[in-house]
Amino acid sequence: MASPIAYWEVPDIEAKLAEVTAAGATVKEPVRDVGGGRLVATFTDPDGNVLGVLQDR
């Protein structure tokens, strides 16, 4: 069973992913459109936690 993932809404998902990867995170699932104009992506932080970001257009 997978653990739940917390998502934070951001104004610019690409910029936020660039910021977190520069800080040592690794993109787990790249940006994808899940419908209704919502973009989501997940990343793994340096401690191994999987977190998500979302952007509504």
Image (cartoon, grey):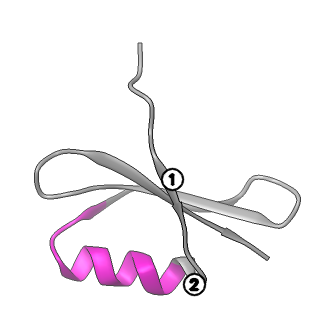
- Circle 2 sits in a helix, a strand or a loop, which is it? loop
Residue 29, can we see it? Answer: no
Of all residues, the one furthest to the left in this rendering is 47
In-image side of 14 versus 51 (left or right):
right
Residue at image coords 41%, 75%: 17
In the image, 7 versus 31, the foreground residue is 7
Dominant secondary structure of the residues highlighted in magenta in the image? helix
- Amino acid found under the numbered disc labelled 1: Tyr
Q: Eyeballing the image, is 14 above or below 9?
A: below
Residue at image coords 41%, 21%: 2
Residue under label 1:
7
Where is residue 27? Give x, y as percent.
35, 61
- Crowding at dot 1, Cα within 10 Å, few <14 / some 14-19 / many 20+, comes out as some
Residue at image coords 83%, 67%: 37
Q: Eyeballing the image, is 52 above or below 56?
A: above
Q: Earlier in the sequence, mark 1 or mark 2?
A: 1
Residue 33, can we see it? Answer: yes
- Amino acid found under the numbered disc labelled 2: Asp
Where is residue 57? Give x, y as percent.
79, 77
Residue at mark 1 to residue at mark 2: CA–CA distance: 14 Å
Instruction: Give residue 5's quadrant in the image.
Output: top left
- Circle 1 sits in a helix, a strand or a loop, which is it? strand
Contact, CB < 8 Å: mark 1 with mark 2?
A: no
Q: From which residue to which does the magenta span run?
A: 14-26
In the image, 12 versus 9, the foreground residue is 9
Instruction: Give residue 55's quadrant in the image.
Output: bottom right
In-image side of 51 versus 30 (left or right):
left
Instruction: Give residue 56's quadrant in the image.
Output: bottom right
Residue under label 2:
12
Of all residues, the one furthest to the top in this rendering is 1
